[in-house]
Image (spheres, rainbow, N blue to C red):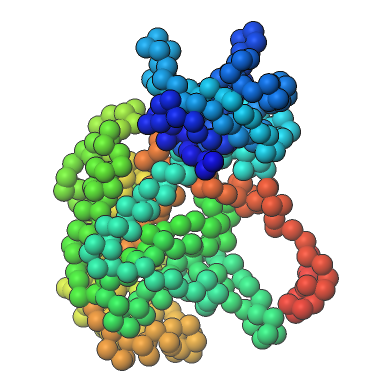
Amino acid sequence: MKRIFTSETVSKIDETVKVAGWINARRDMGKVKFFDLRDKDGLLQVVVAPGDVEAEFEAISEDIRPEWVVEFEGVVKARGAKQINDKLATGTVELLAKKISVLNKAKTPPFELDKDTSGIGEDNRLKYRYLDLRSERMAKNIRARHAVFQEMRKLLGNQGFIEVETPVLTKGTPEGAREYLVPARLHPGKFYVLPQAPQQFKQLLMTAGIERYYQMAKCFRDEDQRGDRQPEFTQMDFEMSFVEEQDVMAVIEEMMIKVVETLYPEKKIQQVPFPRITYKEAMEKYGVDRPDLRKDKNDPNELAFCWVVDFPFFEKDEAGNWTFTHNPFSASKPEFHQDVLEKKNIENIIAAQYDIVLNGFEIGGGSIRNHQPEALKAVLEIIGFNEEQIQNQFGHMLEAFEFGAPPHGGLALGMDRIMAILQNEPNIREVMAFPKDGNARDLMMDVPSELPAKALKEANIKLDV
Ligand code: ASP
């Protein structure tokens, strides 16, 4: 007999079916035993009663413990009106077991999985993440994440965006974060780096004529672990050609509204269209560039989006030199274009750059880019790059733009943060399947870890620790 999912039992009353999964809980009522069987769809109550279960299987049911993997064959029965359990999707039925087969035993888990695990020590949850993910809340978070990704892919696909994968072994870019280095065994002394964002590739895809790109992209940043950061995280990275700021913002705004309406109908977006605030206003009025515009910060269903626009392009770094505020590829607003080319009035140049903010968190940002090589070069000169550095680090971009790059712009959304807010979770680790801990370690896989001397030698590495 083919195994069905627990969710399918509700339409199979009085039919004989086979279900399988994990024992979520067991209750003994005299000679009758009740098991909550858990599969990917949820729980089903299974009743093992003497007389109903075939004699040879009766003894097995004595042994079965939580988290054992068990298969039951039996008849789906409608529950009497008083027995209906509204909390379960299968609460109108139960399975009267005839046959039982233990597919695997399980040790007692280090924490209870039939309860919310948010109060359990996080080291334990991360070490046994595969168990934590069995708990209802965590399983829901992972599935909700999938649903949001699917919905975004669908909405973008409907508008002619295509998903293109870009390399993970690549070249460094100054986008503000330290990068992870990967030694190139075949090229002693040389390195790849892991991308902090697919920024350059998406711009090269625009140069390649793709016009509408997106990618659910893994990004890597080797930063000191502060607060709610992760060394690797996921962006919905996005770029389009022949557009201005409002075109990019419109696509993202429409997409976010549809995602919320479709998947989170209980939530309400405070203001549509999303309010737009200049960086200057935000700083003057709220003292931050990511204002929390919620009316009731205790209402878990309130979503207050806003755009923050008109960022200064440049700021002084600690040493008093000009640096970019966001990324070096941004264009200025058209009215400052000449200032960029002439490298004057630097402190007043406004970038064609926008951040999207939700409930006080920056959930994404982007810009219109400099698609003309001379403008990109001028920006790099303003931030102090000499000709050699420009050629070494950005020669390939400048060259590409000389072959007819279209005007283009885009944005990247921080998917982990978005999911944490939509799922009402306090941090992004709750919506990631396998996050690192606060010290950038994976406690389950036990990495980072030492490597055998042979592996280091092959990678031309001598340790200096
Ligand atoms: N690459 C940028 C970032 O990671 C986003 C963008 O400008 O599209 O912040």
Q: Quadrant of residue 250?
A: bottom left
Q: Is residue 331 above or below residue 109?
A: below
Label total for image: 0
Give how far across and how far down residue 388 sits, in percent.
48, 89
In the rendered view, tell whether residue 122 sits above or below residue 394. Answer: above
Q: Pinpoint residue 34: horizontal percent, then vertical percent.
A: 58, 18
Rendering quarter of residue 351? bottom left
Q: Residue at x 79, y 77 (%)?
A: 457
> From the viewer's perspective, is residue 40 above or below residue 364?
above
* Image quarter of the C terminus: bottom right
Whole-percent x, y for residue 368 in the image: 26, 70
Work out whether residue 200 or residue 41 is closer to the camera in this orientation and state it. 41
Residue ranking furthest to the right = 453
Res. 169 in view = yes
Name the residue: 41% across, 52% down. Answer: 415
Q: In the image, is residue 462 above or below residue 96?
A: below
Residue lying at 55% horizontally and 69% vertically, measured from the top left: 194
Image quarter where the N terminus lies is top right
The answer to whether 273 appears left or right of 311 in the picture is left
Nearer to me, 428 or 260 = 260
In the picture provided, is 186 more to the left or to the right than 375? right
The residue located at (58%, 36%) in the rendering is 21
The quarter of the displayed image where residue 101 is located: top right
Place of residue 44 in the rendered image (x, y in percent of width and height, measured from the top left): 50, 27
- Residue 239 visible in the current orientation: no
